[in-house]
Image: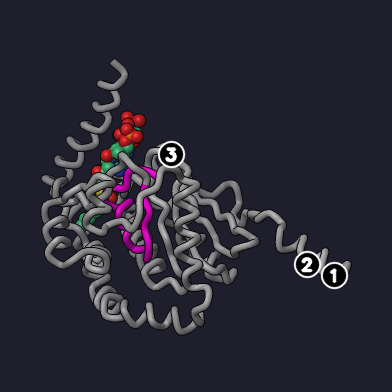
């Protein structure tokens, strides 16, 4: 009797979240003790622009989640309007050479860690997700997004060639023709358009609902053997991973050559200024 009462209490116990990361990090990890799923939150104010430190913390957090044998990983943002603004343009404009190199290496590392992650991954896209933001969302296996946001690889609009790993992500999610066209045009999709073309799997009205949907997605694997699931995923991604490793060094050198080009620097300066001007206009 006592035992069954104890068991029923256990079953009914509310889910408890444990935080795994230290407060000094630009990411936080909360593990739901009931589901065993880890929520990894981007937490770099104001817009989760990906600088060296945020990418470093992301890498460490992904590793921590894998090492702690979580059942799945949900990626989201603490900002209620922006998932991630993509790469921190200040790291690319008039760059410090060593930091720029590090930035790209860390971005490659994050992509690799998520693309080859053993766990099921899902993105709760609770805000805008341009460029690097779209990369983080589309490297995951499932996406749910809030209305009135935008997502896409806008690189070519900025005169930037999207790296091959953007292509790998899109080809996993979109038909080839749509992937090629949207990458080469630098298209940004509204939430509704993203749902229509399959760039996101679902649309919900709150972050809480988005996290619930991601949990449900991860739960669809509950009865699947984890090793078989993980190896099946690796099998699908092996050719991309192989090509990435072959081209990784070249990809880094292209990025460095690209951002050090005077024309590119001029364009970046104008773009950064236009983003700041937008705020000045809003204040008038
Ligand atoms: C081979 C080379 C490959 C290189 C690949 C690059 C991939 C990339 O990721 S490039 C980055 C592309 N990102 C963007 O184009 C996003 C630009 N930003 C926006 O569209 C908007 O900021 C937003 C929709 C994300 C958010 O809008 P919101 O109104 O909430 O905020 P803002 O007032 O626009 O911005 C606040 C603040 O942040 C500055 N900022 C915005 N984006 C970036 C960024 N990516 N890097 C650095 N800084 C950024 C913006 O200028 C404002 O700054 P101030 O407060 O100083 O005015």
SS type, badge 3: loop
Stretch in magenta: 126-145
Residue that mark 1 sits on = 3
Q: Residue at x 52, y 73 (%)?
A: 222
Is the residue at mark 2 in contact range of ligand 1, meaning its CB lies under 8 Å from it? no
Along the polypeptide, which appears first: circle 1 or circle 3? 1
Classed neighbour count for the residue bearing mark 2: other residues with Cα under 10 Å, few (<14), some (14–19), many (≥20): few
Give x and y (percent) for residue 61: 51, 60
Q: Position of residue 107 (x, y in %)?
A: 35, 59
Identify the image quadrant of the N terminus.
bottom right
Q: Residue furthest top?
A: 284
Placement of the C terminus among the 4 image quadrants: top left
Q: Quadrant of ligand 1?
A: top left
Q: Regarding mark 2 in the picture, which secondary structure is present there? A: helix
Residues at marks 1 and 3, CA–CA distance in whole angstroms: 44 Å
Marks 1 and 2 close (CB-CB < 8 Å): yes
Decide if residue 17 is in sight here: yes
Q: What separation in Å lies between label 2 and label 3 (alpha carbons)?
A: 38 Å
Q: Pointer 3: what residue?
A: 80
Determine crowd level at label 3: few under 14, some 14-19, many 20+ residues with C-alpha closer than 10 A: some
| Residue at the spot 59% in from the left edge and 59% down from the top edge | 31
The residues tagged by marks 1 and 2 sit, at their Cα atoms, a distance apart of: 6 Å
Asked which quadrant contains residue 183, the reply is: bottom left
Question: Looking at the rendering, which quadrant does residue 13 occupy?
Answer: bottom right
Q: Say whether mark 1 is within 8 Å of ligand 1.
A: no
Q: Return the residue at label 2.
A: 7
Q: Position of residue 163 (x, y in %)?
A: 22, 62
| 273 vs 40: above or below | above
């Amino acid at each position: 009797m006592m035992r069954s009462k104890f068991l029923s209490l256990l079953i009914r116990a509310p889910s408890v979240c444990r935080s795994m990361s230290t407060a000094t990090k630009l990411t936080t990890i909360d593990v739901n003790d009931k589901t065993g799923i880890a929520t990894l939150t981007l937490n770099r104010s104001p817009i989760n622009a990906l600088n060296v430190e945020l990418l470093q913390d992301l890498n460490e957090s992904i590793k921590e989640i894998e090492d702690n044998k979580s059942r799945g990983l949900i990626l989201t943002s603490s900002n209620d309007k922006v998932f991630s603004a993509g790469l921190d343009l200040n790291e690319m404009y008039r760059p410090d050479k060593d930091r720029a190199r590090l930035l790209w290496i860390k971005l490659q590392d994050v992509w690799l860690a998520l693309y080859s992650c053993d766990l099921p991954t899902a993105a709760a896209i609770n805000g805008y997700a341009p460029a690097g933001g779209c990369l983080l969302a589309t490297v995951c296996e499932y996406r749910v997004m809030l209305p009135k946001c935008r997502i896409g690889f806008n690189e070519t609009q900025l005169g930037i060639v999207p790296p091959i790993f953007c292509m790998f992500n899109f080809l996993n999610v979109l038909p080839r023709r749509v992937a090629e066209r949207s990458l080469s045009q630098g298209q940004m999709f509204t939430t509704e358009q993203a749902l229509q073309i399959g760039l996101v799997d679902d649309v919900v009205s709150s972050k809480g609902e988005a996290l619930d949907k991601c949990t449900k997605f991860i739960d669809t694997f509950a009865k699947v053997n984890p090793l078989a699931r993980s190896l099946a995923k690796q099998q699908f991604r092996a050719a991309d991973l192989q090509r990435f490793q072959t081209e990784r060094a070249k990809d880094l050198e292209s990025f460095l050559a690209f951002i050090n080009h005077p024309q590119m620097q001029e364009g970046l300066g104008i773009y950064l200024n236009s983003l700041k001007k937008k705020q000045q206009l809003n204040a008038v």
